[in-house]
Image: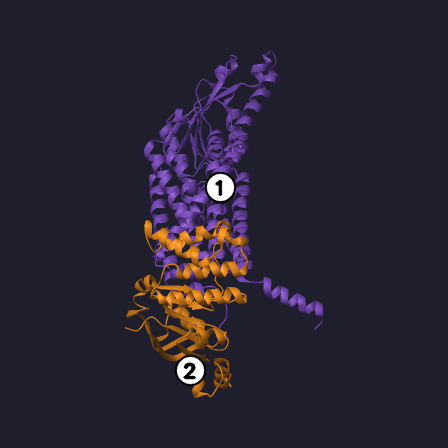
Chain colours: A purple, B orange
Amino acid sequence: MSHLLNIIRKEVKELLTPATFVPIIVMALIFGSMGNMIGGATEEAKKLPSIGVINEDRGQFSSIVNETVYSMAKVVYNSTSENIEEGVNAVKEKGGTALIIIPSNFSINIANNQSGEIEIYWIMKGAGIMDSISSGVVESILHELNTKISEELIEKGNINATFALSPTTRNETTIFKGKEMNGISPGTISAILSSQSTAVPIIIMIIIMMAGGMVISSMGMEKENKTLETLLTLPVKRSSIVAGKIAGSAIVGLLMAVIYMIGFRYYLSSFEVSGNINLADYGLTLNVWDYVLVGISLFLALTAALSMCMVLGTFAKNYKSAQTLTVPVSILALIPMFLIMFKDFSTLPLSLKVVLFAIPFSHPMMAVRALLFGDYMLVISGIAYAAVFSFAMIAIAVWIFKTDKLLTGTTIHLFRKER
Amino acid sequence: MPAVEVHNLVRDYGKVRAVNNISFSVDDGEIFGLIGPNGAGKTTVLRIISTLLRITSGEVRVFGHNVAKEADKVRKLISYLPEDAGAYKNLTGIEYLYFIARFFGEGKEIEDIVERGVKIANLGKRMDDKVENYSKGMTRRLLVARALMIEPKLAILDEPTSGLDVINAQEIRKIVQNTVKNGTTVLLSSHNMLEVEFLCRRIALMDKGKVVEEGTPSELKTRYNAANIEDVFVEVIK
């Protein structure tokens, strides 16, 4: 064997460890899932949206409405009499996106140079970026409808140009998680919620990555600096060592995150949607109890993250290997951040729902949006899960500290074959 | 009551038997030496007595307390100095001593413990420097001070003078001797046979996980008709 091959062989053997390739495999799986999700959304955008139509108009523009709607959408509910409740329920049942109501005076008003009002009831399923794709398709139908009526009016001539270009107005109501919000579209709600809730997952991700890295590094340094043996012979409870390390790292991690976020806040503020829309006008506010729940959720997510890092830290042989071990935690913090940005928990496929729920850091990221719409079950079950997860991780960490595995390295060699 | 009682101690690492059914005892107030070649099992025995490692079979008692079942009680009586120990690099020497002292006392007691530590370490103004700026010898002196300042009932010292020059090593030996005068029992391991002969009242010689000889230095020298313990060591291991 040549010297070069000999060196290559040694390098590959040194570098190809579970710690190196497991995070890459996990990352590949995440990209795969996200690809499926994005692919699904693209398919959804291509599909005809399901809508309901109540057309009470019998006038000249009524046929344009029917032609446009039937050619561009799948009509799952069709009626000529105004029964909104029945229409909304029917569209909801069939997974539709909106109920379009054309009033009886629609054509007459337009013919008299008055705007024809289209009433729309949006059925919003989620507040993620991809959740509003189907409503975007319906928006294009409404735009097309407006254009065709414009063309008709222009063809006839002798008409006010401004009116001809915009002969219809809309009165929209969005129904989302049991709340009816008048005068606002799903796209606007989604944009406002996204701009408001982007900061939360990023803050949580940064705290987890920084504080978690601290815990793991602390274990790596104890081993590298040969201080662990002394620490373990001191008359102190193992649970105190674990708790002390977690709390100490949490303090430093939070401090670093606060400094980081001061700068990041200014960066984020440049993306915020400016406008006159205030979610509080639609009853979308958090009360004191909600803030307490968010706080508990955040605290438990941090505890869960740090206790998990403590367990991971026991695998660290030194400071360098500790840095590698922060990768799985960072990945786990990134998954919920991206998923929540694109989709609502309720609109995710079951497999991704399970993944998202199982990651304890997801819960404070989802909490604000869930509480705005009164979804207490998701938040409280998330808190309970994170508490159980933290308790289990702390118990495992204390158990490892009580055994001699930290010194003999039995846990580190889990993947190694017995010789 | 003996300070340490080791009965039929066995410790396996996977399929390797590091300690093979050994028994010995250390009397209260004596300096007892464990000597042997590399890989003989000395450090494993010291780590077991220090509650760091679990026992495969057998029993170890420190002042009557079972190390496996009463580890918390044993930890209050002992102080362990590992061979390659380090200190927290971002702490100063004095901060490190305070950190340790707070586990063993409260209020005035802490001050007394640290005062003893400063005296043992004898690092002068360098006590206020960060440990990362210490030489190997200075770090070792700080660690010896850390181990002995609490006046433990049993000090377990693995190669206490490891890495020290002759002057520093001699100082540490004197400190160990003085510690015993204050009522501490010392169990140490060393490769330095002269050190062992100079310090220890009794010696156990380990090889391949077993205690192959035990006695006072003079008994061993007579038994093997040797001029010093180094010759005894060579004769036994041969």
- Residue drawn at 39 percent across, 65 percent down: B178
Percent x, y for residue A406? 43, 63
Q: Chain of mark 1?
A: A
Q: Amino acid at mark 2?
A: Ser
Q: Which residue is mark 2?
A: B218
Residue sitting nearer the eye, B2 or A417: B2
Q: Amino acid at mark 1?
A: Met
Drawn side of residue A13 relative to residue B10, left or right: right
In three-dimensional space, the C-alpha distance between marks 1 and 2, rounded to whole angstroms, equals: 62 Å
Quadrant location, the N terminus of chain A: bottom right
Provide the secondary structure element on which disc 1 rests.
helix
Percent x, y for residue A178? 36, 33
Q: Are marks 1 and 2 on the same chain?
A: no
Q: Chain of mark 2?
A: B
Task: State whether residue A401 is above or below residue A198.
Answer: below
Percent x, y for residue B108? 33, 50
- Residue drawn at 51 percent across, 53 percent down: B131
Q: Which residue is mark 1?
A: A256
